[in-house]
Amino acid sequence: MEAISRSAFAGVVALVFCAFGASAQADTAPPKPTGTTDMAKALEPGPLPELTVGDKAAGVPIIEYGSVTCSHCAHFDKDVWPAIKAAYVDTGKVRYIFREYSRNNLDVGAFMLARCNGDDKALATIELLFATQDRWAFVDKPLDGLVEVLKPTGLSREGIETCLKDQTKANALIKITETANKDFSVQGTPTFIIDGKIYGGALSKDELDAILKPLIK
């Protein structure tokens, strides 16, 4: 077999180091926050019980403001949240708080229905609404879609119609959004608050890794 020439060897070495360098630089840098806030203030409870996953007494808190009619929020819930939950929440490293951010009346109504299922079931109902978003959020008759989607949860049409008349609950959900706008300058969904930093827009698993790893002891 003919020996490899010196110039060819140099080329191979260059390719190897080039590939290694690309791999070494593959780690995602933390995204730049869009603002900052006092984390203690951000964690102050609102007018409704917090929707929390994880140990309330431990773990780095993550607050997500999400809209149930937001396609980016639905993508996060489907493609990013399960990995974050497995890596950080289920291991006690992170405490996750979801807060309802209503961009429109349909958001308010859908969140009301999630709450009418019980505060302890609200997050599971919201996840169901994200997973079935195309069946109720972007259709001509969203109420019919919601009735069909929420049937397995035990909510009947009559129960849904009764729930949607609860003005006190609607006002509380609107208050959550107003507070997010006023105190944390939330301008879209999803928005995350982590370690006093506000991140507007969807975050990937890699970006969240880059944010969380330095915070976890």
Image (spheres, grey):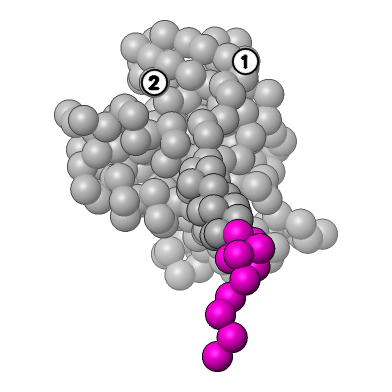
Q: Which of 71 and 160 is in front in this view?
A: 71
Between marks 1 and 2 in the image, the one whose residue lies nearer the viewer: 2
Farthest-out residue, bottom: 1
Say which residue label 1 marks: 185
Q: Which residue is drawn at 67% across and 30% down?
A: 188
Q: Which residue is drawn at 20% across and 38% down?
A: 55
Instruction: Pinpoint residue 115: horizontal percent, then vertical percent.
Output: 44, 43
Say which residue label 2 marks: 195
User: At label 2, which amino acid type do we have?
Assistant: Asp
Q: How crowded is mark 1: few (under 14 residues within 10 Å), some or many (20 or more)?
A: some
Instruction: Pinpoint residue 176: horizontal percent, then vertical percent.
Output: 52, 23
Looking at the image, residue 210 lies above or below residue 26: above
> Does the stretch in magenta take in 4?
yes
Instruction: Pinpoint residue 203: horizontal percent, then vertical percent.
Output: 56, 40
**Which residues make up the magenta segment?**
1-11
User: At label 1, which amino acid type do we have?
Assistant: Ser
Quadrant of the image occupied by residue 41: top left
